[in-house]
Amino acid sequence: MIEQLEAYAGEWDICIIGGGATGLGTAVDAASRGFKTILLEQYDFAKGTSSRSTKLVHGGVRYLQQGNIKLVMEALHERGTLKKNAPHLVKNQKFIVPNYKWWEGPFYGIGLKVYDWMAGRLGLGSSQFLSKEETLQLAPTLDADGLRGSVVYHDGQFDDARLAMHLAMTAADKGAVIINYCKVKGLIKEEGAVTGVYIRDSLNEKDYEIKAKAVINATGVFTDLILKMDDPLQENIIAPSQGVHIVLDKAFLPGDTAIMVPHTDDGRVLFAVPWHHKIIIGTTDTPIESHDDASLREPVALDEEIDFILEQIGRYLTKDPTRKDIRSVFAGLRPLVKGDSKKTAELSRDHLITVSDSGLITITGGKWTTYRRMAEDVINTAIRKKELENKPCITANLKIHAAKEDTGFNEPLYYYGTDAEHIQSLVQNNKTLGELLHANLPYIKAEIIWAVQCEMCMTVEDALTRRTRAILLDANAAIEASPLVAQLMAKEMNKDIHWQEDQVRQFRNIAQNYLPSG
Ligand SMILES: Cc1cc2nc3c(=O)[nH]c(=O)nc-3n(C[C@H](O)[C@H](O)[C@H](O)COP(=O)(O)OP(=O)(O)OC[C@H]3O[C@@H](n4cnc5c(N)ncnc54)[C@H](O)[C@@H]3O)c2cc1C
């Protein structure tokens, strides 16, 4: 992709900084409207918050509790739109809300009926009351002591980094230039107006200048660092809040049903959701003071966050999970827009678009679920402010790259949609590529070859963290698989043994953050 950048010396219509959900969605919107679009990501696509979510495409039952009707309505609408446009990635997930007190059944039952009603014809299924016996049939490891029954409801579930990759590919299919490992180091300004960006490609260590009619800052928790490039006196607008998840073996919650705990000790909701044959449990809400590049890059779970999750979920399961049971732990930072409130759990999940005096456009906040709507809003703003041609947004009906109907979510390679055929043909041509990377991981060698050839996979970390989700499913297994992955990649990329050793070392350093200490 850097070759495409080098080949084009003209002015771009839209330059997007940041390759997470917001930036990639914006690139899809801009390119599909016919704008000449470039996106720059300093590390890998979705390396930040966008690969560290709870993986729910949801209206947000919690925001309903808070009375944020507008956000819930918008998110439920987007949930339906995404399910239609990326049917290979968005799964209909059944959730149980267990009731141990007499009032919980009617209370949550009515709330979830309102949730159903708000989704309207885009609903994924009606909520209903279940008896104790019916509840235990769906979730046999739920603590039966004192259980009165449950309310069951439906929401969407997805693979966040995979959707990010398919958004990058959708934007590229529509003509955008999408580049990872390219950091914006500064803003080009002429007479006080932002007219482009200075960038450094960290792979070839070359610097470039990019001129663009509109520069869009979509950098999540890094937003303030870009705003300070524009105006060093700018006050921070983001209050990062850390959320942690732990991953357990499926034995803790067999079957296909997720659990939603509506009220934890800190007043949040807690999810335990089946995902790629494991269980993801989270999350927390811990305000983070530090705004520097290094601490935003690799957030690390705190011991007390892990203990909190273990304790809360332990109250609902027959067998209490311990640290030894944790296969992986991951932390992500919410880019919450500051408000008057001091508690991050109460800060707005709504998105915010600002236009600086220099013309720099910033979009932040929001949720993965609402990325498409956020992108539509920010490109509409760019059209208005930068006098670009007024072309209509088409993403509400635009299929995402590799979209495939009737996906069998238990089939191997389902998350590649129609691209699975290409991976299967790699295996047909070379049977050894059908071998697993590791006995405890569901990924085959051909997925690494495909990632290098067609998904801009540059490092072992890209391969084991976001092209596959190995590190989230089993961090120790991912560490053990890393030399093999480095070897496969080196052959494909024409790299030597020193590159392989360096890649494995770097990956193992990062992987330490996914292992629970103690
Ligand atoms: C714990 C947790 C759970 C969540 N669960 C859900 C959920 O289940 N469902 C849901 O809908 N939402 C969820 N969210 C919210 C959702 O994940 C975020 O709103 C979304 O991922 C934010 O995307 P983003 O693109 O704005 O930020 P990011 O994903 O952080 O992307 C910003 C990107 O900008 C890049 N960047 C920064 N500076 C530069 C620079 N100078 N040059 C180039 N690139 C740069 C970064 O490297 C980064 O990749 C969750 C969030 C958290 C933290």
Image: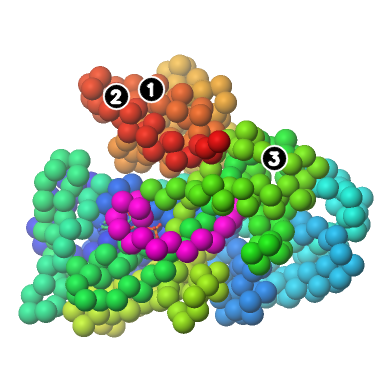
* Quarter of the image where ligand 1 sits: bottom left
- Picture residue at 27% right of the left edge, 64% below the top: 225
Looking at the image, can residue 179 be seen?
A: no
Q: Nearer the viewer, residue 297 or 416?
A: 297
Question: Disc 2 or 3, which lies upstream in sequence?
Answer: 3
Query: Which residue matches tag 1?
Result: 483
Q: Secondary structure at mark 2?
A: helix
Residue 38 location (% of width, % of height): 24, 59
**246 left or right, relative to 175:** right
Q: Is residue 438 rendered to the left or right of residue 105?
A: left
Which of the two discs, 2 and 3, sits closer to the camera? 3
Percent x, y of residue 60: 62, 67
Q: Amino acid at mark 1?
A: Pro
Q: Earlier in the sequence, mark 3 or mark 1?
A: 3
Q: Which residue is mark 3?
A: 321
Mark linked to residue 411: none
Q: Is residue 246 magenta?
A: no
Estimate the x, y position of residue 454 in percent, counting from the top left.
34, 38
Q: Residue at x 8, y 75 (%)?
A: 190
Q: Which residue is mark 2?
A: 500
Is 287 included in the stretch rendered in magenta?
Answer: yes
Question: Residue 426: x percent and y percent?
Answer: 42, 26
| Mark 1 → mark 2, Cα distance in angstroms | 7 Å
Q: Dot 3, crowdedness within 10 Å: few (<14), some or many (≥20)?
A: some
Which color scheme is applied? rainbow
449 in relation to 392, above or below: above
Ligand 1 closer than 8 Å to label 1 CB: no
- The answer to whether mark 1 and mark 2 are in CB contact below 8 A is yes
Q: Report, in whole angstroms, how far the alpha carbon at label 3 lies from the one at label 1.
A: 31 Å
Decide if residue 237 is on the left or right side of residue 112.
left
N-terminal of the two: label 1 or label 2? Answer: 1
